[in-house]
Amino acid sequence: MKKSTLSRRNFISRAATAGAAGVIAAPALLNSCAPKIKEVAYNDSTLLNQAPDGPELKAALIGCGGRGTGAAQNFLDAGPHLKIIALADLFQDRLDECRNKLKKNKNQEIPDENCFLGFDAYEKVMDMKDVDLVILATPPYFRAQMFEAAVQARKHVFMEKPVAVDPTQARSIMSTAKKAEALELSVITGTQRRHQRDYIDLYKKTAGGMIGELTGGNVYWNGGKLWHKNPRPEWTEMEYMIRNWVNWCWLSGDHIVEQHVHNIDIANWFSGSHPVKALAFGSRQRRVTGDQYDNFSTDFVFENGIHIHSMCRQINGCGGGVYERLQYTEGAANCHWTNGHLTDLEGNVIYTYPYPLNDNGNRYLEVNPYVQEHIDLVTSIRNAKPINTAEDTAISTMTAIMGRISAYTGKEVTWDEMMNSDLKLGPKVFAFGPVDVPKEVPVPGKAWNAKS
């Protein structure tokens, strides 16, 4: 039998002290007091339905899959004089499909010389002097290095969540976010709930004390199975894994990180903090490819003793629910798509966001939050008032990673361990061939007790 490559080190490997060799992070980040969730400026301003006019902003899309193509179109919908001038991807078919959709749906013509392929394609985009802004929508594993390159090239950034798959990358994002801030670059991440008007309204009401002090809550993303790809004879293992990225932990972070980070981010946002420890469990019941779990349940504990329960599941045929419910001393904030409301302790609705109604009498949002995040980005650039949500999203991503590692190991994991961890996922060599990464599914308890 092949010896398992899984060990405690594979999951949490950490230095004994913050200054120990092997810890890759800015010294200021390696303590339990830093960082804290910041109240982002746009939450206190009037959200526009469209970004103001101004000189043409030229963007490049890096990662031409479904979400990348969608993000590019959302950017173009944000206001006048916006243009996509370059595309980058690993695969010709994905680039071609995106290119055709942008031409058909948005009348965007991307010339051949601005279409780049390969693992180094993003570097060629960064070298383009007429690119003002980059949209980063590759599998999450690549986010940290591309964000660093974008800031180094003085580009404004929109990057999809999550922003990391391991603690090393999460700290890298935090550090690069500070550099972007110093350069007065605007950075928006794909945590669209922070740009969703009903969520912002409930946040303001609760932050203002309308229902008292936060005491706990529940954040859930319980849905069905996502897509998967089966291997093909003409694909190398590297191509297969990247095309099937939502099913491999090193590429996606597992679904507690890749998808559930949205809900975890709300817990951090509304609390104004982040958990100091997590105890979780999870399992793999019906996932057919990759090495990930398909369900997690996590008890996040905050510094003030508040517990927030996180649950996520990707299994067909099960009870669902995607929402956040935050409990306060005098009521609860119930965050749902077009059903955001506050209740008192008896469950009576005391406030509902004033949604407009369509012709059928159904509630809707004035602006799609996937577009609103680009409106906010473009507005900040054109008004020369930079905003930067990268650090907040890195903190929420690190929170999700903490929950994942607890479930994989079966043990409590602390924030300090995450901030001192030298864990780095992924292969050392990126080429179309075999991929040297662990492929076993984690078994709680065994992974923790195994010798490094």
Image: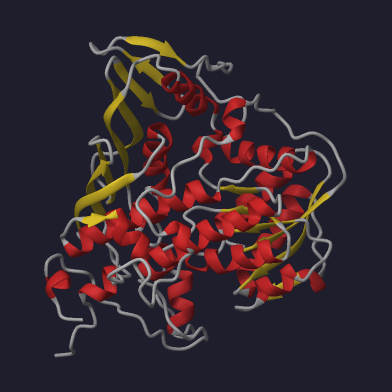
Q: Position of residue 3 (x, y in %)?
A: 18, 88
Q: Quadrant of residue 341?
A: top left
User: Which image quadrant: the C terminus?
Assistant: bottom left
Residue visible at 69% across and 28% down in the picture: 48
Q: In which quarter of the image is residue 94?
A: bottom right
Q: Where is residue 230 in the image (x, y as percent from the top left)?
A: 39, 72
Q: In this view, does 21 lie above or below 228?
A: below
Label tally:
0
User: Which image quadrant: the N terminus?
Assistant: bottom left
Residue visible at 24% across and 50% down in the picture: 278
Q: In this view, does 166 lie to the left or right of 189?
A: left
Q: In this view, does 103 lie to the left or right of 439?
A: right
The residue most toward the right is: 55
Q: Position of residue 233 (x, y in %)?
A: 44, 85
Q: Position of residue 272 (x, y in %)?
A: 41, 35
Answer whether residue 395 is visible to the viewer in this image: yes
Residue visible at 67% across and 75% down in the picture: 121
Answer whether residue 228 is visible to the viewer in this image: no
Residue visible at 44% across and 57% down in the picture: 29
Q: In which quarter of the image is residue 382?
A: top right
Of 373 and 384, which appears nearest the observer? 384
The structure's colour scheme is secondary structure
